[in-house]
Amino acid sequence: MGLRIIIFGPPGSGKGTRARLIGRLLKIPVITTGDMLRDEVSRGTEIGLKAKEYMDRGELVPDELVIGLVEERLRRPDCSGGFILDGFPRNLNQAEALDRILGEMGVKLDLVLNVVVDPEIVVERLSLRRWCPKCGAIYNLKYDPPKVDEICDECGARLIQRSDDREEVVRRRLRVYEEQTRPILQLYLERGLVREMRGDIPIEEIPREVEEVLGPYLKETGVKAPKSGI
Ligand code: AP5
C-alpha cells in the first residue's frame, strides 16, 4: 500500500518542488494539474484552447475541464499504489469530486501537506522560476539554478519561463487562492489529515523537512518507502 497525498499551498510556495521529491522517494506518481493543463495547451487540444485564457489571466480553469482530466488520471493502474496530487483540489466543488472519485475507487486520502509561506516571497520567486516543458523539472535562477544556463539538468531540454509568472498575474493567482482554495483546507483539518510544511526554508533544506514530516508517518503506518532513505 502506498500513500495518497495532497500537496496544498499558494502559488510559488514550493508544492511542485516537494511533490517531485516525494514522488521520487516513495515511487508514486505525481499528478500536477497545472502541468497537465499546460500540456493540453501546448498540444492545442480542445481542453487546452479553452483552458489557456483562464490560465493567462491567473484564474481557475472551469471545473468541468479539470475534474475529468484528474479522474481519468487517478483511475490509471499506476495510481493503485498511491499518488500525490499537486494543485488539485482548488475549490469546494473539486474537493467534493475528489471525495466521490476516491470513494468509487474504494480508497482514502492519507495526508494533506500544507505549505505555508508569506505571499510577498512568492512574487520574487516566481519571477525567477524556470520550468522544463518536457519533464516538468523546476528551477530558480537565484535559489536553484540549472547546471548549464537555461538547460534542464534532468532531460537536456531548453527551459522556459511560464507566461503566468508575470507579477500582475501572480498577484491575481494569490487572490484566487485566498478566495477559493484556502477555505477548503478546513475540510481536511476537520478530518485530521493536515501536516504543515514551511515554505520559507532554504531550498536545500527541503529534503530534510520532507524526511521529518513523512518519516514518523511512514513508521506509524508501516508504509514502505522503497530505497528512499527515509
Ligand atoms: P499551477 O501550475 O498549479 O500553479 P500554482 O498552484 O500557482 O503553483 P506553482 O506551480 O506556481 O508553484 P508551486 O507551489 O508548485 O511552487 P514551485 O515548487 O514551482 O497552476 C497554474 C494555473 O493552472 C492556475 O492558475 C489555473 O489557471 C490552472 N489550474 C491548475 N490546477 C487547477 C485546478 N485544479 N483547477 C482549476 N485550474 C487549475 O516553486 C516556485 C519557485 O520557487 C521555483 O522557482 C522554485 O525553484 C522556487 N522555490 C521553491 N521553494 C523554494 C524555497 N524554499 N526557497 C527558494 N526558492 C524556492
Image: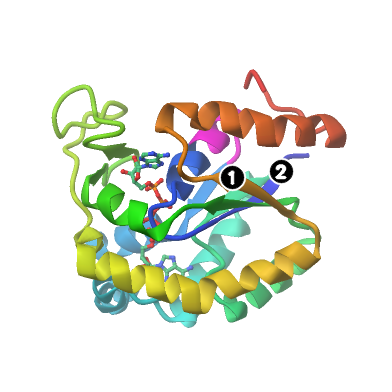
- Residue 227, quarter of the rendered image: top right
Q: Where does the N terminus fall, quadrant-wise? A: top right
The magenta-colored residue range is 21-28
Q: Where does the C terminus fall, quadrant-wise? A: top right
Label 1 – label 2 distance at C-alpha: 17 Å
The foreground one among 126 and 201 is 201
Q: What is the residue that sits farthest to the left in this orientation?
A: 149
- Residue at point 34%, 38% (across, down): 137
Neighbour tally class for label 1: few under 14, some 14-19, many 20 plus, Cα within 10 Å: many
Is 164 displayed left or right of 182 in the figure? Answer: left
| Amino acid type, label 2 | Leu
Depicted 141 relative to depicted 111: above or below: above
Mark closer to the observer (1, 2): 1
Q: Mark 2 points at which residue?
A: 3
Q: Position of residue 32 (x, y in %)?
A: 46, 54
Depicted 218 relative to depicted 105: above or below: above
Q: Where is residue 167 in the image (x, y as percent from the top left)?
A: 21, 63
Q: What numbered label is drawn on residue 197?
A: 1
